[in-house]
Amino acid sequence: MAILFLLDEAQWRTLLLKDIPLLDVRAPIEFRKGSFPFSVNLPLLDNEQREKVGKCYKERGQQAAIVLGYQLATPAIKQTRINSWLQFIQQNPHGALYCARGGLRSTITQQWLAESGIDYPRIVGGYKTLRSCLLTYLEREDNYPSFIVLSGLSCVGKTLFLRQFSAHLDLEGIAKHRGSAFGTLNVEQPSQASFENALAVKLMQLKEKYRCPILVEDESHLIGRCALPKTLQRVMWQSSYIELTASIEERIDNAFQDYIENSPYPMEHGVFMINNYTKILSIITFIFVVVAYLCS
């Protein structure tokens, strides 16, 4: 069997900077809770199998759990897993694989691949180590580029303006949410962990590529359900601001263009958002009327 090898921090950092896909062999439930940009989930164990093995590990120890894992991996299941991994590797020969901690699951994956004549590196420490390093990156102010913060009211065209510049940080794009009153898109937002991972990688890429200030849209603490790191907020507050303005007529036209006419989502979604926003405004207006009446 060929010698299996590992990737250290400097090597996997290069993979992230180049957006090279990574093979994630954790269970789907783990992947959903947190993943990296361009990672692909092709699990060794599915959710049910992982639960059984985990329960066995707690009750009977590691060796019994390993035996159970191999019992669950029938020849048909094993070959299906290997085929999916080989297809991924054929498409991404310069990537790497990982599990939760760079331990047993990624080791078994490497062994099975080696039996098929393929050597594929795994990442030291797995997801936990990469996640920890990216969180540490987000906590340090000196890891952030210089920003110019773009502010303005909803529907003045900030996002369109932002994307005209190559040196920009699209927080709403990473969060998959428009951030405004009409912000909800017809796609699921990433988990907080996945958002933070993608943000850290993007910041690393911007810092590596540009020496000029990075344009970023002013955002509140939350973009939908995704929370901005406190360090990012602090750096943005300390940055230079420019304000984009537009007339009310232009803002109405922008809203129609963005959420109805040019939206990549069905028209019904945009109409729903506008109707929903109208209902919210009606409720707020009603509350103000009641409060004014009670105070009179």
Image (cartoon, grey):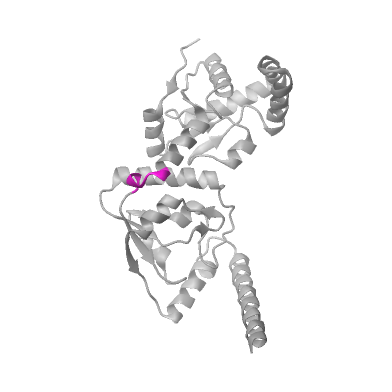
Tell me where residue 251 appears, x and y as whole percent: 45, 76
From this view, report whether residue 254 is shown above or below residue 17: below
Tell me where residue 20 appears, x and y as whole percent: 43, 36
User: Of all residues shown, which one is farthest toward the bottom?
Assistant: 296
Specify whether 86 is left or right of 95: right
Residue 18 visible somewhere in the drawing? no
Q: Residue at x 41, y 50 (%)?
A: 231
Q: Exactly how many numbered labels are in the figure?
A: 0
Residue 207 visible somewhere in the drawing? yes
Specify whether 173 is left or right of 165: right
Secondary structure of the magenta portion, mostly? helix
Q: Residue at x 39, y 34 (%)?
A: 13
Snapshot quadrant of residue 171: bottom left
Residue 98 inside the magenta-drawn segment: no
User: Of all residues shown, which one is farthest toward the front?
Assistant: 295
Q: Residue at x 68, y 29 (%)?
A: 50
Tell me where residue 40 appears, x and y as whole percent: 54, 36
From this view, report whether residue 244 is shown above or below residue 95: below
Tell me where residue 250 appears, x and y as whole percent: 43, 78
Specify whether 167 is left or right of 283: left
Q: Residue at x 47, y 16 (%)?
A: 4
Quarter of the image with the C terminus in it: bottom right
Q: In the depicted view, which residue is nearer to us: 55 or 52?
A: 55
User: Of all residues shown, which one is farthest toward the left?
Assistant: 211
Task: Write the start and end of the magenta stretch as one range.
Answer: 138-144
Residue 139 inside the magenta-drawn segment: yes
Snapshot quadrant of residue 8: top left
Q: In the depicted view, which residue is nearer to us: 95 or 100?
A: 100
